[in-house]
Structures are given as C-alpha cells and as structure tokens.
Image: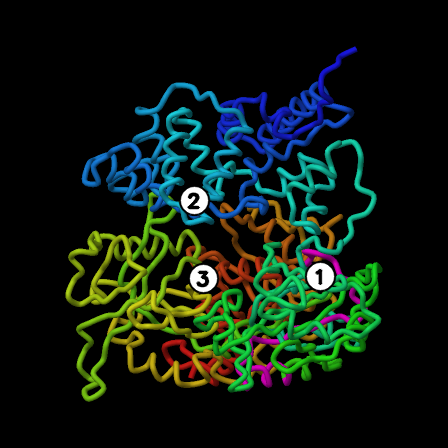
Amino acid sequence: TSTGAVKHYNEADGVASKIPFHQLCQLFEKIHKAKSKYTQRFKLKTFLSKWRDLQRKFQVDGKTGTCYPAIRLILPQLDKDRPSYGLKEVLLARLYVDVMGLSRTGKDAKKLLEFRNPKVNTSSAGDFAETAYRQLLSKRCIDKGSLTITQINTYLDKIATYNTEKKKDLVRKTLLEIIQKTSGIEQKWLIRIILKDTKLRMGHKVILQEIHPDAEELFNVTTSLKQVCRQLNDPDVRLADTEIKLFQPFRPMLALNAAINEVDKLMENKPFNIEIKYDGERSQMHKEGNCYKYFSRSGKEYSTVFGETPYIGTLTPFIHNCFDDSVHSCILDGEMMGFDPQLNIFMQKGGKFDIKHVTEDSDLQPCFVVFDILYLNDELLTSKPQIERFNLFNKLIVPVEGRMHLTEAKQASSNKEVVASLNEAIDRREEGIIVKNPSAKYCPNKRKGSGWFKIKPEYVGGVVDDLDLAVIGATFGTGHHGNMLSMFHLGVGVRDSDDTSRPPEVFKSFCRIGSGYTDKQLLQIVAKIKDKLKVFDKKKVPDWLRVTKEKPDVYIHPRDSIVVQVRATEILASASYAANCTLRFPRLISLREDKSYLDALDTIQLENLRSIADGKLAARHASLSDQPSQPKRRKLKLEPRATVSSNLISTDFTDIEQLSTSFENKIFCVLSGSDQHPKQDLEKEIFKHGGKIVQNPTPETFCVVVKNIHNVRVRNVIRSQKYNVVRLDWLLMCLESGTLIPWEPHYMLFATQATKAAFSKTYDVFGDTF
C-alpha cells in the first residue's frame, strides 16, 4: 500500500495537461477545411470521444474532470469565466510588429497593419489571423510547439489578468513567451481564440449539440460553458430538467417582431396586454436576503457596480426596502434605465452615457424597471401564466421614483388599440411597445412562439423618415466579405445657412452602414464607385473631407459617388463622426440612382431633424391602412400541374408544417426565384407562414413575386397592368423577419392604380415620405 500523500483531482492536471495544443489546432484545421457539415461534426465527435476516454484513464477517486479546458478554446465567444483580453486586430498587429522587432514601415509590418486592404493582402484580406500566418508566422516561428492545452489556458488567463490590471508591459512579455514556444499554425488559431472568432464554419449550436444533446438548452439557462461541461459530462445521461436558478445568469425570454395589423390573430382574438418597450439594458436581478446580483442579457455580472449588499453600489441601497417583508429570495427580469432626477425622465440608451459606469456625482442614476418575476422564496414561477406573474410582482414591490419602477400594462383586444398605443409611444418618443399573451409561460432564450411581440415605428411603412446620404468612403470587410469593400461611410454636406443654394464644398462624416444590403447590391455599389476610390491617409486628409475617430480605408468625393437611402431608429450624439452625431441602427434601403449628391442630406437639414422629437425619426402616426388591405376570402381552385418548366411546376405542400400566420389570407404568385432561392423553396416558405400559392395570377392575387423583368412571362404580367409585381428581395426580407413588411415604392416593379393612389398619400415623386 502506498504511504504517499492522498492525491486529489485537479482539472489542470487532467487530460488538458496531457494533450498538446498543436493537436487541438490540427482539429481546427480539419474542421475548417472539411467539405461537408457531416465531416465537421464527425471530426469534433471523434476528438471529444477520445478526450472522454482519457478522462476515465486519468480519473482520481472516481473524479474524471471535463472537456471544459478544450471547449473554452473551441467556443471562446461563449466563455464568460475569463476576463477580456483587451486585444483587437489593430492592437495585436502592433504588438506583433513590436515583439518581433519589425520596422513599422517594412513590408511585413505593413501587411499586418493593413490586413483588410486587398491591395496589400491579395488572398487573405479581412482575415487577420490568416494574414499573420501567411505573411509572418509561417516563416519566423518554430516548426512545432511544446505547450499543452493547460499551459495555453494559463497564458490566456495571464493576458486577461494583466489587461484588467492595465499592465501592458506584462501583456507584451506574455505574448512574446507564447510566440517563442508555439508554431505559426498554433499562433494562427491562438489569435482567433483571442479575437473570439475561430472561423470554424460551425455554429455554436452545432458544437454544443456534439458536447451533449442537452447542452444548448442548459447553456441558454446558465450562460456558463463551465457549468454545461460539468453538469453534462456524460453524453449518455440526459438532463432531467433545466431550471432557472438563483444567482446563476440565464438567457432571457425575447419578443418577436410583429406587424400592427396581425396582433389580434397572433393572440387568437383573445385579450392581450400592451407594455412600453423600454430603451435600456436588459438586466436580471437576483436577491436572497441582503445578497444581490445583477446580470446583463449576455450573462455578464455587474453586481459590484449596482451593489451586492444594501450598503454599497449605485442602486441596491436605494431599493432594498422596496420589497414586501414576505420576500426572502427572488429573481426579477427587467430593464436597467438611466434616470435624470432633475428632468424626471428616462434617458434613451442611444444617448452619450453608460449606465454601468454612472458615478454618485453624475447627473443620471440607474433605475431598474421590473416587468417579470421568475422566482420567489425558493419557488420557480416560469410555468405560471404571464398575467399571474405580473400581478404578483405588483403586490410584492413598492416602486421608488427614479430607482425602481414597475412596468404598466394596458389590456387590449384589437389591432386598433395596438395602433393607438404605438402612436402614444411615438408621441412620448419611446422605442415602441411590447404585446404579451397573458397566458404565456416564461421560456429562457425563446423568441419564436414565446407569446411576446415587439412593435416599433420603423416596422411600419412610411412612419419613419428615410434619409438620402452620399457615400464618402468605405472600409474593407472581414470573413465572408474579406477582399472587398463592405462597410460604407456616409457624409453630410456643409451648407451655408445664408446661401443654401450654394453647393456644399465640405463634407462631414456622419455614419457607417454594413447591413440591409444583399450581396448583389453590395457588388452594385462597389462597381459604381471603385474606379474613383483613393486610399485614405490620415496624415493627408483631403481639404473637402472632415473625419474624427471613425476613418475609412478608402475615400471618394461625393460628386463622383452615389446616394443611398438609409433607414434608422434615431439620430444620436457621437464624437466618432465629424457631424457630432450619427444614426442608431442604420441599414440600407436602396440605391438612389435618381439623385445626385446635391439632393442628399446636408448639415442644415440634419440639425432640423435633430431638433424635432429629440432626433427620433418617426415622422407621423401609424394606422392600419399602412398595411396592405386583406383580400376577400375565396376558395382556391387548384392549378393544373405543368410539365414544361420548373418555374411552372406547382409545389407539393404535403407534410409541410405551418409556422405562423404572417401571410394568412394572402395569395401569392411566384413567377421566378434565384439560384440561392428556387421557386419551389419560396412557395414552401410562403405556405409555412400561412400564405396560399397560385401558378397564374388571378383577380384575388395579393402580389406577383419575381427576381427581375428579364422574362417574357413577367413582362406580360406587367403589361396587363392588373397585378402588383414585387421584387424577390421584398419577399426574402418578409421571410427573414417573419412578418409581412408593408410595401414601399422601391419594392415595386409594377404597382396597380389602387396601390399608386395609396402611395401618393405618403410618398413624393422621388418615393420619399412627406
């Protein structure tokens, strides 16, 4: 019998200390290069299986450890147990240039520092890790590293700790140690881990499913990879029940976008509740006696900020006495708002403040708005109806002005009441409204089928003003859009208020857009401006251009550029742009080839917009007439199955499950699809959302959907002037959002007289809202 000391299991001494990091990198390479999803999953499954075999081999006192040390490197974006590294591409590039003794003006350094520029990096532009590997690491590093997975995790812990302590010299020293002990291929994947984007081409849901069949469900509740790996260590043992637990963060329940004319159907014509949509930070409060914890929507903890006890923090000391004496423990879901006690109003999230960094001498104070209670005195309440939970927290909590508020609910039963509530929100300059099913249970991280719906002014056609802006520059993309321009910088011309007829000679940066466009639109924009683009040099900024923090990679004078139509929620203050303001959630609506830069937004018009409604872009009230009218219900005649072209073949809807009623009572005729979206697939998606399909348009047809007009059949339909013909992009947007998006002029290839008459009440000759 051994007389040595008793050995206790330590995860760091387990499998992770036996497996070299380069083996994990080999797995990454195989998954990244795999040609099929099946192969990717098989490679990961095999790795995890071998890991678990080793766990059993190295177990101590029956304790086997978990796969967490590897999983946190495979899914770094989900690992909340390690603080931020404080390292992004540009800073990493400078660190590599520094620690490897490169000249800042040298060829290798330039390729790192300008990794997004395809003129500098032709094959790997937009992928910093690949650029660093190809241009630098593969030539200057050792052939094979010696570090284990445990040692790599230790080094990453050091970098995160030193960053938190603001010890940049020690971050540099640690990075140098890693470089000396790892190969180029290992550093490529280490960079991706640090940037929390491994580019494995496997979604996190797929990876979680390979860890354990119940891993995704548990992660949605706990938001902890460590807990998932520990609790689900054996893939053959299923999770009995996944519950929200006290002092453990969870992914909150979410609301689905909805149109104002479909709420009564979504609620099955039963009464529902309407609440204010607060524009703050989604937060959860956990309380047990004098102990409090606060978590963000993503599971990040802010208890030290808001207060872990009634005696410290910016919030807890002011709300501790709000609770009824019977409340010992509870979990509350709500919104953390910024409250101005002088003006007695909530500040919008888009303002220039971060409620998590508000100090005692600030003009603002945190205020927690409660809209749900999920746990009370050791009892989980998620299975109880929403209205029962709502009534409960209203009985147990006494609000305190500016510190803790309770959301108010208005009972309604019709779309007309929804419109009235949305218009009240517009008048109060609020973000929108939330509609809730009173019988809905609380399901963490659930959006579709949750029974909660959000309605915002920008979801209603014509309610929000779109802006015409000149493209003044662009930034090279990353990942899928690497090697090409994908983020466009937009500007406003500086007009002289004394002579507004004089063309602007100076343009100020105003915002960037990187969403709302298809790949086809992206190529169209690039094609129109690429020949006039010039490389931006911050030391030689052209006389006509004004920029601040946000700078483009390339620039173009507006007279040589294009105008784009952009939609956003509001205009908010920002020092990042020369206009001293920017747009919140901007997205491209269309290219305005009918307008020149002289027709685009200028500084005078911008200031007028900022002064109206505090920058909110909702220009008028909503009404049910904003939505396309419902056609009369009529029994459909089945069209005969064609045998000539696939475009004429009717789709088989047998065994297709209906997911929503977004297209209910709407009859569609899809004349053509695309390579990515075949006609039959589109018809199935329409059917899933409650729509009906005909192969030839009839008087009852809601609209005809086409890819383009380069088709004899499409041209004949337009020539008949009987049907509304809409672009395929409109249908794809509807399917993506799960709602019936109102028509606007730019969606139409042909509009009937009735539709044109409806547009004339809202849009001018340019297609802009009045």
Of tags 1 and 2, the one toward the viewer is: 1
Q: CA distance from mark 3 to mark 1?
A: 70 Å
Q: Position of residue 366 (x, y in %)?
A: 57, 72
50 or 173, nearer to the observer: 173
Distance in Å between CA atoms under marks 2 and 3: 35 Å
In the figure, 20 relative to 364: above or below? above
Q: Tell me the crowding category of disc 1: few under 14, some 14 to 19, or many 20 or more residues within 10 angstroms, Cα based.
A: some
Assess disc 3: are there few (<14), some (14-19) or many (≥20) residues with their C-alpha within 10 Å of its C-alpha. Answer: few
For marks 1 and 2 on the same chain, the one whose residue lies earlier in the sequence: 1
Q: Amino acid at mark 1?
A: Cys
The amino acid type of the residue labelled 3 equals Arg
| Label at residue 757 | none
Q: Earlier in the sequence, mark 2 or mark 3?
A: 2
Residue 719 visible in the displayed image? no
**Residue 756's x, y, as percent?**
48, 79
On the image, numbered disc 1 is attached to which residue? Answer: 291
Q: Which residue is mark 3?
A: 715
Q: Do the CB atoms of the residues marked 2 and 3 lie less than 8 Å apart?
A: no
Whole-Å distance between the Cαs marked 1 and 2? 46 Å
For label 2, the crowd category at 10 Å Cα-Cα, with few meaning under 14, some 14 to 19 and many 20 or more, is: few
In magenta, the rendered stretch is 420-449
Residue 129, compared with residue 455, is above or below; it is above
Q: Secondary structure at mark 3?
A: helix
Q: In the image, residue 44 lies at what x, y percent?
A: 61, 29
The mark that comes first in sequence, 3 or 1, is 1
Question: Against 342, is 453 above or below?
Answer: above
Callout 2 amino acid: His
Secondary structure under the numbered disc 1 in the rendered image: strand
In magenta stretch: residue 260: no
Q: Residue at x 83, y 43 (%)?
A: 240
Q: Are marks 1 and 2 in contact (CB under 8 Å)?
A: no
Q: Which residue is mark 2?
A: 480
